[in-house]
Image (cartoon, grey):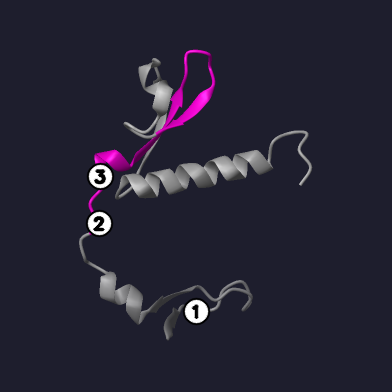
Amino acid sequence: MRYWLSGPRILNGLVRPGISFSGRELAVWGKKPAAISPAGTLGMMRRADGAIFLAIPDRNGDHEREPLTPVAAFCFTGANAAEMAREGALVRLATHMPGRTA
């Protein structure tokens, strides 16, 4: 069940600002978040040839020997979560490649 706290109507009654929450959301409020694992880091790295590479520490195969320049990093609770995010990103990239018909 969701609870709704609303504010006064504004813009001639067009908008009624408010907030909603559920009991489940309140139950986790204030609890410590899951720990981030260094193995769960997904980095966007630039290779020497200028291509962007999605890197996970110790799970990059032959690319471990290449010099990589960090561009951005995303942290997850474990290596499996980082791998799932990388696979999902690669699937989305493959479906949006120019010249590809879906």
Q: Position of residue 54 (x, y in %)?
A: 46, 32
- Which residue position is annotated with label 1? 8
Helix, strand or loop status at disc 2: loop
Q: Position of residue 82 (x, y in %)?
A: 39, 44
Identify the image quadrant of the N terminus: bottom left
Is 33 located above or below residue 45 in the figure? below
**Distance between mark 1 and mark 3 Cα atoms:** 44 Å
Is residue 102 visible in this depiction of the protein? yes
Is 77 located above or below residue 50 in the figure? below
Give the magenta range: 33-55
Q: Decide whether residue 62 is among the magenta residues.
A: no
**Distance between mark 1 and mark 2 Cα atoms:** 37 Å
Name the N-terminal-most of marks 1 and 3. 1
- Amino acid marked by disc 3: Ser
Residue 37: image tag: 3
Helix, strand or loop status at disc 3: loop
Residue in the picture at 61% in, 71% down: 11
